[in-house]
Amino acid sequence: QALISIKNVGRKYVIGAEVIHALKDVSLTINKGEFVALMGPSGSGKSTLMNILGCLDTPTKGEYTLNGINVSHMSDDELAEVRNAEIGFVFQTFNLLPRNTSLDNVALPLVYAGISKTDRSARARKALENVGLGNRVDHKPNELSGGQRQRVAVARALINNPSIILADEPTGNLDTKTSIEIMGLMEDIHAKGNTIILVTHEEDIAQHAHRIVRMRDGLIEKDYQNPDIHTVS
Ligand code: ADP
Ligand code: ADP
């Protein structure tokens, strides 16, 4: 079933007399459980599309339906609610709170969800164990390696059982070996049934995805199953 349905979406930016069509006419369907890499040169519209997919922005044309909810015309407050319920974000720069422990960083989305402190701690501890950081719950970000920080961020992204994980250059600040470890973690998460959309510039990283969408000049140029991954689906 379609988890994400984007139909003839456009996004233009108006700056004074100039109109930039960052997305011209994009249609895209993503089903539950897919692992998609979004690629394309700088300026091709990847961030604009990710912002729309992540309910940080709305299209200026066309429709976006996420998990049965038409979010195309929502206010910022309505969007924020959908975002908190439906989306887990992973960023290039980890975006962890520097003064908080791994446990508190991972538990944070549950504060907004109104979960009790005891339950938050128990769930965050379990989530950290699931990403191999059961022995780092009381560490702060500056006491962790880059790869460990990204694992904390992945645990935080998953804590609310979101319907999609949006990962924006998640390996952009990591060395090759650590990048491969983080992509291994992404594959494990995908194998558990999660839907992942990954933006990357790196072909090697994109090869972990099962489907590759390439953008150019605000349009989808190519959209195909990764021939190097053989799956029965
Ligand atoms: P990518 O992520 O692929 O590099 P973007 O989505 O960031 O591409 O940008 C697509 C186009 O839209 C570019 O021409 C960029 O300059 C323009 N753009 C992106 N964001 C804005 C903005 N907030 N205001 C004006 N123009 C923007
Ligand atoms: P970039 O990849 O351009 O360096 P980020 O990956 O940090 O930027 O953020 C990508 C987008 O997500 C930006 O538009 C930013 O405003 C937004 N964003 C950053 N942090 C959060 C957050 N905690 N919750 C929701 N949106 C965020």
Image (cartoon, helix red, strand yellow):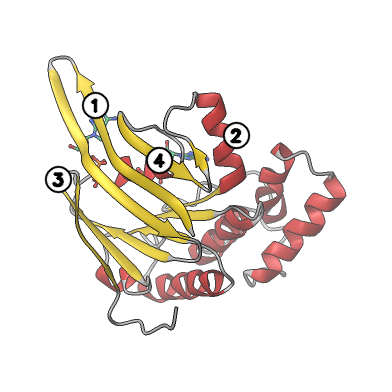
- Closer to the camera, 87 or 66? 66
Identify residue for label 4.
64
Whether residue 124 sits left or right of residue 67 in the image: it is: right
Of callouts 2 and 1, the N-terminal one: 1
Residue 101 visible, this angle: yes
Of callouts 1 and 3, the N-terminal one: 1
Identify residue for label 2.
81
Disc 1 residue type (three-letter): Tyr
Of callouts 1 and 4, the N-terminal one: 1
* Residue 88 x/y as whole percent: 54, 51
Distance from Cα at disc 3 to Cα at disc 2: 31 Å
Q: Quadrant of residue 232?
A: bottom left
Distance from Cα at disc 1 to Cα at disc 4: 18 Å
Question: Does the numbered disc 1 mark a residue whose Cβ is under 8 Å from ligand 1?
Answer: yes
Residue ID at (37%, 70%): 209
Identify residue for label 3.
217
How dense is the environment of label 4, judged by Cα within 10 Å: few (below 14), some, or many (20 and up)?
many
Q: Quadrant of residue 99?
A: top right
Distance from Cα at disc 2 to Cα at disc 4: 16 Å
